[in-house]
Amino acid sequence: MKPRSGEYAHLIRMAGLFAIGITAFLLLRWMMVPADFGLLGHYRAGAVQDNMERPVMFAGQAVCVECHTDVAEVRAKGRHAKVSCESCHGALAAHAQDPDGVKPKRPDPRKTCIICHTASISKPTSFPQVVPAEHAPEGSCADCHVVHNPKLS
Amino acid sequence: MNQDRRSFLGSTGTLLVLTASAAIAWEHVLAGTPEEAPNYTATDHWWGMSIDIEKCIGCGTCVRACKTENDVPREDFMFRTWVERYVVDPAEYEHPKVSSPNGGYDGFHEQEVKDPNLKVFFVPKLCNHCAHSPCVQVCPVGATFESQDGVVLVDRKYCLGCRYCVQACPYGCRFIDPRTETVDKCSLCYHRITKGLTTACCETCPTGTRVLADLKNPKDPIHAFLRDHKVQVLKPQMATGSKVFYNGLDGSVR
Amino acid sequence: MQGVEGFIYPNELELQWSVLIVLYPFITGLVAGAFILASLERVFNVQAVKPTYRLALLTALAFLIVAPLPLQLHLGHPERSVEMYLTPQPNSAMAMFGFVYLWYLMVVLVLEIWLDYRKEIVLTWQKSTGLMKLLYGAMALWSDNISPRALDRDDRIGRALTVIGIPSAFMLHGYVGFIFGSIKANPWWSTPLMPIVFLFSAIVSGIAAVMILYFVTCWFRKVVVDMACVDTIATYLFYAFVVDFSLEMLDLIHRLYESDESFRALDFMVKTRLFTSQIVLQIIVGTIVPLAMLGLTQLVRFREPVRRVIYLVAGCLTMVGIFAMRWNVVIGGQLFSKSFLGYTGYKMEFATREGLLPAILLMILPFVILWVLIRLLPPWGHEEKTAARHA
């Protein structure tokens, strides 16, 4: 029986399918690639902005000092001069935003001071460290030390 | 060529060039050039960090601060930064005993070592924000990249979660955040440093071990640090262009 | 498997790439290997293996269709996988997956199978009714021209496609080897030999798979196995395996000799956590035993029934060995810490997204697809066509 289609019909139609496929792909690509992709490098330029937009949890000591000048003065005279407020007091940006609404809890010296000052052979020898059980078996470190300027009070 | 044809060609050419340039410009307008924080120009900075091993007391304040600042899951196998403790027998410095209980989050209290002949010290670790980063190199879609100011960042909206970058990082600083099913890692507190603050870990480090560094700033203390100390980076043989510089890094550190 | 031993970086506790990522190179390896076997007849005119030509192509297609599925199951965001087509990062070996896959699927496999089967498709189209008529008509692209000139042209195009297909198969599986081999952070993976080792083990596994399938389909059809065919296949399997084994031994000897920083940690790992999968399953059961069996058949002329059993057993052991090799590369490469001071363990769960159950189902699926393909496009009964082609 004589075929209805030409010799090349199937090849042409397959080529046509490929052409449609490739065009559809290019169209999809043009539509779907984020508009800001590739502006700064092989990435979505908006990602830089996304990374900038996280909430800040630690205010930074400069902010604390603005209000708490008295404590800052005491601290400046002693060995804790370079220790930032939030090292011991935790994240306080919320308090800095709303000083009356957000009142941070006073840190427990027995927990906070001990973390840094427990004697350990691993710590540099120049760093002030004590064995808590021998140095002060009970009571708070604040009983004897002014925590912001830790010489004996 | 007569005058009319030349002028026709000239005006057509100009029109084509202008149309093409307008098209490109319009594309940028539509995209919206990313707005930087006010007064922050990325190309003015080249961020890194200096870490002074000789000052580190292993208190873990940096680890706690980072988890708080960056909302990192509190599990003990996901850290943006962590502290390791090395106990080195000087005769066997290639086989140190290393530990990092909960990444150093609670300090190292229960890990007492008594022998004074041993060398013991702490090594805080984080993403090294490599200038030739192998993690950026392998990301198949461009979801992690080095910003113009030298910080290796993750695009959480684009990341597939294929984990190739986690395999490629020689320092083990990446992990998968199960809440977003994308990769997460130290971003050098990008949201802070672009506003003139320092990173959470540097802010809270009580001994000044960790200090943010801007290598493009001629007044930054990093330059004196690099000049006056014997400085090392982690795994220098990998040639990653690491920008976290350690003073006092012992040869046993892995 | 055991838990943590020694020191690992805290983020290294959980493995990143699971059994699904073991499955992916295994599957694409079968695709590449089956295709190489098919090309033996088409390009290199190895007449003896022509009974397996079409079966090999359909096997390759069945496995290729399944290949992206383990990857999709593994991704944290499979809906974003289209990004690999939108913004492939040119430095990343993984980025080329989408394009290499599409190329191989459409241009190499689908086109070649279509051209080779076109006559049967048209004839079936003309003979069938209803839904089947529609299906076969679509497959024929509604062209009914199967004149000798058209078929001859199809044949020449098909041959050209096979020639292109060989380097394409190398790309399809070689890039997977490169994905591992280019990671300088991981000394178990980082070697220039990795793509080549992957490729040769792929060829070995693909040939073994087609040989086993040929035995199985002959048994189902109650047809006598063509011994000249399987003898030839077994010979090619043997020599490919010799090359593969030599390459893997070269890697091992090189590591032992240079004994660099990572060696101690890796050596300890192989002797403990990886002992069963590497020494027992991959090397002894999966390589040395089948190699010895196949080598024996090259030296001693056994009777046909004995040879059949040897080939079948050796083929099955080979598949076990190659799967173990993928396991040892992927899982083994993640068991040790990059600090070289410790190890972690792989907790494979059962019925989770990346657990054992999906892995088993994904390994069964290609055979289901192959069964459908064999029903639609029977690989047998075309001997007179191949004879005519080479007349």
Image (cartoon, coloured by chain):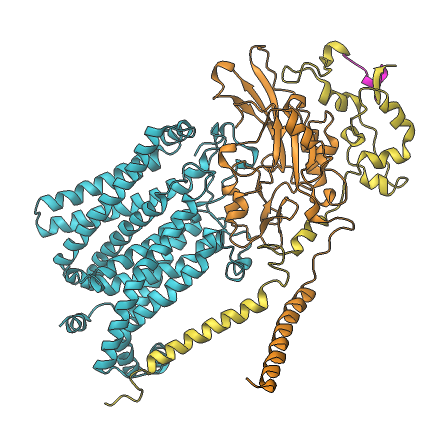
B66 displayed left or right of C194: right
Q: Residue at x 32, y 37 (%)?
A: C251
Residue placed furthest toward the front? B2
Q: Residue at x 68, y 40 (%)?
A: B216
Q: Residue at x 59, y 11 (%)?
A: B114
Residue A53 image point, x, y percent:
73, 50
A114 displayed left or right of B121: right
Which of B84 and C362 lies nearest the eye of the viewer? B84
Residue C199 image point, x, y percent:
32, 50
Which of B150 and B117 lies nearest the eye of the viewer? B150
Task: Give the quarter of the figure containing the N terminus of chain B.
Answer: bottom right
Decide whether residue A140 is among the magenta residues.
yes
Which of C192 and C186 lies nearest the eye of the viewer? C192
Instruction: Say above or below: C225 vs B23.
Output: above
| Residue stretch rendered in magenta on the structure | A137-147
Residue A49 image point, x, y percent:
70, 53
Residue C136 image point, x, y percent:
33, 78
Decide whether residue C58 is among the magenta residues.
no
Q: Residue at x 13, y 49 (%)?
A: C307
Instruction: Say above or below: B231 vs C28.
Output: above
C59 displayed left or right of C84: left
Q: Tell me, what hue is chain A?
A: yellow
C350 displayed left or right of B121: left
Observer able to see residue B191 = yes
Q: Which chain is cyan?
A: C
> For residue B193, which quarter of the picture?
top right
Q: Tell me, what hue is chain B?
A: orange
Observer able to see residue B125 = no
Counting every numbered tag in the picture gives 0
> For residue C373, which quarter of the picture?
bottom left
